[in-house]
Amino acid sequence: MPGLKEGAAYPQAVVDRYIAEGHWNDETPQQWLADWADRQPEAPAIIAPGRQLSYGELYEQAGRVAAGLVDLGLRRGDAIGIQLPNIPEFLIAYHGVQMMGGVLTLLHMPYRAGELAPLLNHGGVKAVICHAASPNYDAPTTMVGLRNQVPPLDQIIVCGDGPADTYSFASFEDFRAHEIEGPAASDPAVLAFTSGTSSAPKAVVHPYWTMACNHRIYAEEFGIRRDDVVLSAPPFSHIYGLCVANIILRAGAANALMAAYTPDAFADAIGDARVSMAFCGPAHMLAAIKGGQMTAEVATSVRTFIFAGSACPPGLVEETEGICTNAVGHQMFGMTETLMQTATPLDAPADVRHRSIGVANSAHEMRVVGEDGEPLPPGEEGELQFRGPTVLSGYFNNPEATEEVLQPDGWLHTGDLAEIDEAGNVVMTGRVKDIINRGGIKINPIDVEALVDAHPSVLLSAIAPMHDDILGEKACLFVQLQPDQSLTLNDVLVWLADHDVAKLKWPERLELVADMPMTPTRKIMKGVLVAELHARDGL
């Protein structure tokens, strides 16, 4: 089976081209850390509740972790899993793994043994760094149990107390940084899973080339300054959060940490750390606005909010600016397969920032194509595609999935529907797989979802297809209610009629859910909703 090095490999002609064009060079994030530790050792690198680390301290502690990992028998190219919240230990571990040439393997916090086993096996993970047991999840015991299912897995490293046959993360303090052969820029840096816990996961290996290229671009695109305090609401165990951590590092700014999202924690992190720039998903902000936690007083220090991770409902950026009067809202788009790809420019007018995800970055090509695969002119809806130096070389050990999304000429199918205007701004219009085919009439639910989200009784909503023997598919509306609220299907239909929504687009069933299934970036997992509906209906 090909190793991670092969999973990050590109054809030599592609390598030569991107090096010649200046997109790929010898930079790595740990070199950025070493540089800032030398240039500004006392400057804050991490600001967490009750704890702060300078760049000098972060560099020193990461070096100790690197030395400790080598002492445990881990070597350059080994996959090292991490399942930690956004706490200082995550970033210390991340840089320590990279200093000794390991490949950080991202494991989402909600995953348990059933989801983790196929991912760990797929990546050949040799060690896992996890948190101590909590009332809801005993991670160390889970990881120890997985040793029987994951033959390569040897070391379980625990932040906090762990069972006798695990290693304490705190023990790395006993080591001293020393000269270790680090990675080359062509080496694999991160293994990230896009989705799936099946027998054929979709995993992306990003080499340092793609990561350094992308994060150089966006540290500049977003105008991050060395005196900025930047918050990532998405977890670092998701590629969105890790990208934010890297562009903060590239700029030499301070990384404000929020261990886990709640509306209260989001507001507290912004206010307590005096955050000047915050990256979040639309659902992060929606919940904080609806719950009353996001106010002008809380966000008085914020200069910029950047929304990504899922489609931004119409009006959300404008509403955020109306509440957080010192801040300007921007939108961004990215994927695990491509890292960050588009953003609204800092000088973009309000109309562009409110309705679009901006323009492609300078290193990439972008187009929208029709069902025949041919490029479409401005203003026409089709599938969004990208090509360039941060697009994956292929899914790791999954050629079938690669063939589905990556064309031989390098164009990547995103699965997203969009329009590109004359100025090159991208307006997202939906997901190909979310389209409901009702008796041959294709219905895009995105606008209806945005209206339902605006209902005072609704916290979150999603419309997904349900099976119908006659029409093939109909629309089912899933709703998570605001506390102490109620809602009927008729209430929804009256609301939509009052907002002049065509009857054709109305949902024909309402399902109330206690908690909406969400990805780490707070994107609703419609596939889970559909599967539960099918199970309930015996399909």
Image (cartoon, helix red, strand yellow):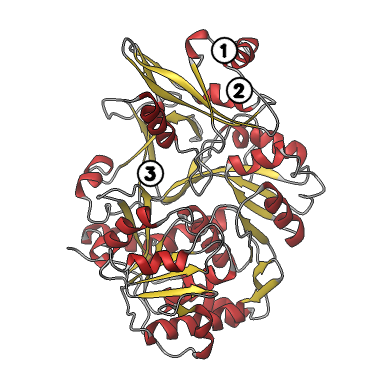
Q: Dot 2 corresponds to which residue?
A: 451
Asked whether residue 350 is in view, the answer is yes
Q: Are marks 2 and 3 in contact (CB under 8 Å)?
A: no
Q: Nearer the viewer, mark 1 or mark 3?
A: 1
Residue sitting nearer the eye, 166 or 49:
166
Q: What percent of the width, then of the height, locates residue 483? A: 69, 34
Q: Are marks 1 and 2 in contact (CB under 8 Å)?
A: yes
CA gap between label 1 and label 2 equals 9 Å
Q: Is residue 5 above or below residue 317?
A: below
Q: Dot 1 surroundings within 10 Å: few (below 14), some, or many (20 or more)?
A: some
The amino acid type of the residue labelled 2 equals: Leu
Residue 501: numbered disc: 1
CA gap between label 2 and label 3 equals 33 Å
Callout 3: SS: strand
**Residue depicted at x 32% and y 9%:** 470
**Residue depicted at x 50% and y 84%:** 172
- Tell which circle, 1 or 2, labels the residue nearer the N-terminal end: 2
- Tell which circle, 2 or 3, labels the residue nearer the N-terminal end: 3
CA gap between label 1 and label 3 equals 36 Å
**Residue depicted at x 33% and y 49%:** 197
Position of 435 with respect to 404 (left or right) is: right
Q: Dot 3 corresponds to which residue?
A: 365
Q: What percent of the width, then of the height, locates residue 527? A: 40, 35
The amino acid type of the residue labelled 3 equals: Glu
The amino acid type of the residue labelled 1 equals: Val
Could you tell me which quadrant the N terminus lies in? Answer: bottom left
**Residue depicted at x 48% and y 88%:** 177
